[in-house]
Amino acid sequence: MRVLVTGGAGFIGSHLVDRLMADGCRVRVLDNLASGSRVNLSQWEGNPTFEFIRGDLLDRDTARRAVEGCDQVFHMAANPEVRANKAAPEDHFRQNIEATYSLLEAVRASGIDLLVFTSSSTVYGEADVIPTLEDYGPLKPISLYGASKLACEAMISAYASMYGFRAVIYRLANIVGPRSNHGVIWDFVGKLRGEPTVLEVLGDGSQSKSYLYVSDCVEGLLKGAESDEQVSIFNLGSEDRVTVLEIAETVKRVAGYPDASIRLTGGVDGGRGWKGDVKLMQLDMRRLKALGWAPRHNSAEAVRLTAENVALVRR
């Protein structure tokens, strides 16, 4: 089987590539290296069953060439930034929505059997029901990132239904682990390296969310892909959550700064870290668990393991 992984040089994408290669697949990666790195794929360079294309999905010819001869597509490429000060509206529109449209046009003409898409828990917005099931609604994203992911979900559902391929959509919690180069754990370690006595925490510290270790995420991505429905939507996260303050204390200890004080910024809109930050998030995974998947790590374990890795990388 030949599989295309868009964004395969990135954090989650590269771990998925590792697993697919280990399973004996022929893997093609398309990545513009805007946030990914060839280093993440270095162990597969020169392998005859591995191919890397440096290119952008916004280029229609590149998208068509990438899907040619493939049986399945795992669409991981996206702008990963939720915070408005790190990504403009145009970034989300072009890199998430327009890039997905370009890929779908290529898939439509290619005879691809399956498209797997990594969406986000941010499509739920501020859900009233926690843990949140996939059929929760109405969906009201509070960030442009969440809105762009929801738009991609709608396009993928429509294309799959009209043109006869299967689509699996995952609404991810916060995925953490080795090779991650952004997010709260990465930020905290970097801040402590710069100022070892004080750790600044955005918001009021009570933000509470689910964190899933990347190996559990990859297992979930592959398990849900076995679904035979035309369009399947699965939540993918851990079965509990941790607060930002708990993460801060873990990072302080693991990174070697246990005596650093914590300075809360107070945040915006009732203690959120930034405009568009969902303050409380935990997903109900009963749909994916019914297929036989379950996370091996809880949120606290995922955070600790990631902090240990990031502390080494940023030393």
Image (tube, rainbow, N blue to C red):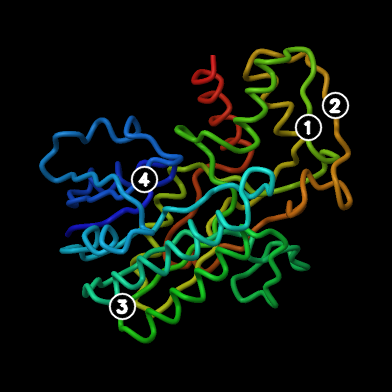
Answer with left or right where residue 237 lies relative to residue 15.
right
Tag 1 or tag 3, which sits nearer the N-term? 3
| Dot 3 and dot 4 residues touching (CB under 8 Å) | no
Q: Using the rendered view, name the quadrant where residue 261 is placed.
A: top right
Q: Provide residue 150's location: percent of width, then percent of height.
A: 57, 69
Q: What residue is pinned by disc 2? A: 263
Query: How far apart, in angstroms, are the residues tagged by discs 1 and 2?
Result: 6 Å
Q: Which mark is residue 32?
A: 4
Query: Which amino acid is tagged 2?
Result: Arg
| Dot 1 and dot 4 residues touching (CB under 8 Å) | no
Q: What residue is pinned by disc 3? A: 165
Answer with left or right where residue 69 lies relative to residue 227.
left
- Frontmost of labels 3 and 4 is 4
- Frontmost of labels 1 and 4 is 4
Q: Using the rendered view, name the quadrant where residue 255 is placed.
A: top right
- How dense is the environment of label 1, judged by Cα within 10 Å: few (below 14), some, or many (20 and up)? many
Element marked by disc 1: strand
Query: How far apart, in angstroms, are the residues tagged by discs 3 and 4?
Result: 26 Å
Tag 4 or tag 3, which sits nearer the N-term? 4
Tag 2 or tag 3, which sits nearer the N-term? 3
> In which quadrant will I find the N terminus?
bottom left
- Frontmost of labels 2 and 4 is 4
Query: How far apart, in angstroms, are the residues tagged by discs 3 and 2?
Result: 51 Å
Query: Which amino acid is tagged 3?
Result: Phe
The residue located at (29%, 61%) in the rendering is 63
| Dot 1 and dot 2 residues touching (CB under 8 Å) | yes
Which residue is farthest left? 48
Q: Nearer the viewer, residue 235 or 109?
A: 109
> In which quadrant will I find the C terminus?
top right
Q: Which mark is residue 83?
A: none
The residue located at (29%, 69%) in the rendering is 106
Q: Nearer the viewer, residue 66 or 265?
A: 66
